[in-house]
Image (cartoon, helix red, strand yellow):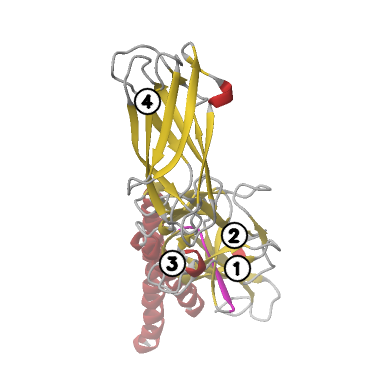
Amino acid sequence: MLGAVYIGLSGMNAYSRGLQTISNNVANLTSPGFKASSVNFRDVFTTGGLGSAFSGSTRSTGGGVAFAGAGVDFKQGDLRQSNGDLDLGIQGAGFLILKDGDKTVYARTGQFAVGDKGDLVLQETAWKLTVLNAAREPEVLNLDGRRTAPPKATTKVSFSDNLSSTATEATVSDIAVYDSRGGKQVWKVRLQPVGSTSPNEWNVTVTDQTGRTVNTSKLRFIGSTVDPSSAKITVTDTPAGADPLSVVLDFSQGVTSFSSGTTSTLRAASTDGSGVGALTRVSVNADGQVELAYSNGHKETAGAVALADFRDPQQLERIGNGLFENKGPAARILASGTDGMGKIVGQRLEASNVDLAQQFGELILIQRGFQASSQVVSVSNDMIQQLFGIRGQG
């Protein structure tokens, strides 16, 4: 009968541990990236003992139940829309690799931000996001040296639309032109017909923001189409302190000369070149690469986010905040979407994968198991009391 008490106590202890596991699952129903723990029990058998009637025998007898540990359910959680450019989730297999000094941890999802030192830091922690270096190994990405984009000198201004053949003048203003040091000039292009002696021929005068004439040339049409020999006009200048400037005014694409009275729609359709740019946005693109955008329109990538793939994720150990430490073999290190690896998705956070209906179902079973085990202890206690009472009756 004492053995029955111990068996009942083993059930109460095991189900208490199971209740703790389910409570933790339910409490983390809304924790991003949380992976539910499964409740596992195992039977316990001994040889003799625990009040067995076969004392000294080699026959096995039930010794109750034990909590077999809580396995982690790594199934995919829902990827939910978020507003952060550096909110990252993974569709499929893989873990983000985070470092802090020599320490490495792994996460399925996270909200990152550019820290004071230029690292991409997991919010409210010191863990930093890593990208693949030239050796395809994870290293912390630092953006301190990339907070500005260098200037790019203008080399081409493309024009489009109609220059009225009966207009007396046409002007295209506010053309931004940059030199090699990022200095900006604002050009104006004025077109005036040469006259009846040279039909379909125009004088082209380029002036800067001070009114200084930068260049004069001619533009000719054959009918309503630009004469290819004059379609591209090269304008040169020597800005102070910068490299010589050479800009092509390109009238070869989409410029016409139909009669439309004195009104022309000629415009500068596009221009290259830019001044110095400040970093305005850091995000992760569809290919899983960190993308930098600058105020001057320049964009560049800063490396592919490093992902880890584990043969047996059950060897990962939770350390809180949705993070894991690896206690098993080394992981494969890959980029997003390569060799069976999942894809990184920006502006998404992976939700908890807790199935509330399943948790409540297991909660009922655990409650009943604890109830039954406690009843075994109660009945065993009553029988022992009765046994002690026999002597008193004698």
Magenta span: predominant SS is strand
**In this figure, which residue is indicated by the disc labeled 4?**
192
Q: Quadrant of the C terminus?
A: bottom left
Badge 4 amino acid: Gln
**In this figure, which residue is indicated by the disc labeled 3?**
122
Badge 1 amino acid: Glu
| Mark 1 or 4, closer to the camera | 4
C-alpha span from label 1 to label 2:
8 Å
Residue 188 position within the rendered picture, expressed as x and y whole percent measured from the top left: 36, 39
Quick one: label 3 or label 2, which is nearer the N terminus? 3
Residue 31 position within the rendered picture, expressed as x and y whole percent measured from the top left: 37, 60
C-alpha span from label 3 to label 1:
15 Å
| Mark 3 or 1, closer to the camera | 1
Is the C-beta separation of discs 1 and 2 under 8 Å? yes
Is the C-beta separation of discs 4 and 2 under 8 Å? no
> Magenta segment range?
102-109
Badge 1 marks a residue whose secondary structure is strand
**In this figure, which residue is indicated by the disc labeled 2?**
306
C-alpha span from label 3 to label 2:
15 Å
Choose between 170 and 358: the one closer to the eye: 170
* Residue at figure coordinates x 33%, y 45% from the top left: 211
Is the C-beta separation of discs 3 and 2 under 8 Å? no
Q: Is residue 233 above or below residue 356?
A: above
Quick one: label 1 or label 2, which is nearer the N terminus? 1
